[in-house]
Image (cartoon, grey):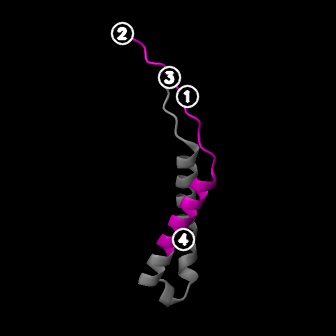
Amino acid sequence: MKDIIESKVKTGSAAAAVTTFVITNVQPYLPDALTSTLGSIVSTAVAGGLTFAAAYITKHTPRVEVEATDQ
């Protein structure tokens, strides 16, 4: 049986990767106050929030029912 990666998992993972990439590249241009602990908290919250939102919006991958066979 072929393993299927559900669309919600793919979308959430992609959103996390893109968000982290963008935050990492924008962070050097932010004031010093935002690059310390506050910056870590904000970047974690933004990445988590966008990952959750992307996975929540994505449609569920339907599962195929497989009948059990007697062996």
* Residue at which label 2 appears: 71
44, 25: nearer the viewer: 44
SS of the residue under disc 1: loop
Label at residue 12: none
Most extreme residue toward the left, as rendered? 71
Q: Position of residue 47 (x, y in %)?
A: 52, 66
Task: Name the residue type under label 4.
Answer: Val
Distance between the alpha carbons at the discs numbered 3 and 1: 6 Å
SS of the residue under disc 3: loop
Quadrant of the snapshot with the C terminus: top left
Task: Name the residue type under label 3.
Answer: Val
- Which comes sooner in the sequence, label 4 or label 1? 4
- Report the magenta residues as a range: 43-71
Label at residue 64: 1
Q: Specify whether residue 12 is in view.
A: yes
* Residue at which label 3 appears: 66
* Residue at which label 4 appears: 46
